[in-house]
Image (tube, rainbow, N blue to C red):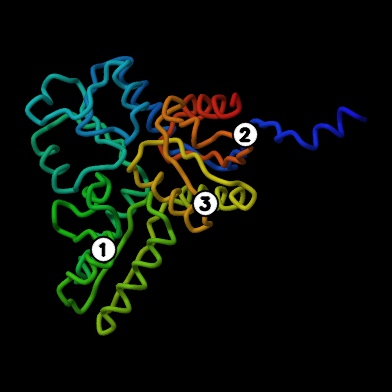
Amino acid sequence: MKGIDEKRFMPPEERKSIVQVAATLGMDQDVRSALARILALAASRKVGVAGKFMPDEAVSALLAERGIQEDLDEADFFKVRRVAIPYSGVSPRLRRDWEAASVPLEDFTAPQVRKAQVALGLLRIEGAQGLVIGRHDDLESQALAGGGCSKIIEDTTDTARLVFCPAFGAVCQSTLSPRRVSWLVQQLRFRYRDSRVRFLDTASPSMIQREEALEKILITCDRAVIVGKPGEASCEALVETALRRGKTAVIVNGPDDLSTEDFSGNARIALTAGAFALDETIRAVAEKLLAR
């Protein structure tokens, strides 16, 4: 009892961090299937990718290990047996040019991207000005915009720069935050009240599930760790989710990016991952957090 009584005057002992893992995180089934397909294809023939296959460093390292070359120029297409269209897709016009030139293509375009391209094409046939709600520097948004055929709307500044049109037809990048997309659509309708604004929601259902899963555990957590590539759309959407809850968030490529100063003490950490993070990377980050 004397020993217990003396502990009242001692500083509290430092405990390890408590990690809560989101119920939905990382790759969905479509992403896993595309990655498995290209790895299987590369096992029997030489494959190159017309761009980045997926916006994740660990995925790029895995492809390089299997002999798959990314960012392949058109002039070098002859060096490979199959040219892979990346998961983010390419513009329909560019694809038609490659098909006309008899390029041996293998299409890995995400189902949501194909859906958005078809929807945007139908809206433009109806006479609407095509709009893509997305990020200017994202390859998926650029593929949907079709080389300038449609305009990319990232914020209200882009909305203000639009020239008035009787009808606007919009789709969205699949990995954007659904809340952000909804807000930009509202701003578009508010600014152009005399125009007919038709929006077809092409956000990925998996992105909605990742956000909802993170929101649930952030109620009892102090901060969030997001596994993925900094700047990648789905990771940034998860950062926005944490900020809405008043919690800080950091995006890490892997366990080496974790900062001891940020996650020391008795922190309760919410762990989630972007749309293209490998399971091995997520597991390595979780193990390092639990070892603190």
Q: Residue 224, relative to residue 144: is it above or below?
A: above
Categorize mark 1 by other alpha carbons within 10 Å: few (<14), some (14-19), many (20+): some
Q: Quadrant of the N terminus?
A: top right
Which amino acid type corresponds to the residue marked 3 in the rendered image?
Lys
* Foreground pick, 130 / 62: 62
**In front here: 194 or 158?**
158
x, y percent for residue 139: 24, 44
Q: CA distance from mark 1 to mark 2?
A: 51 Å
| Residue with the mark numbered 2 | 17
Residue 163 left/right relative to 270: left
Q: Which residue is mark 3?
A: 247
Q: Earlier in the sequence, mark 2 or mark 3?
A: 2
**Cα separation between marks 1 and 3:** 41 Å
Q: Is residue 4 visible?
A: yes
- Helix, strand or loop at mark 3: loop
Q: On the rendered structure, is 126 left or right of 203?
A: left
Residue extending furthest bottom?
194
| Image x and y of residue 56, in percent | 35, 33
Q: In the rendered image, which residue does mark 1 sit on?
A: 122
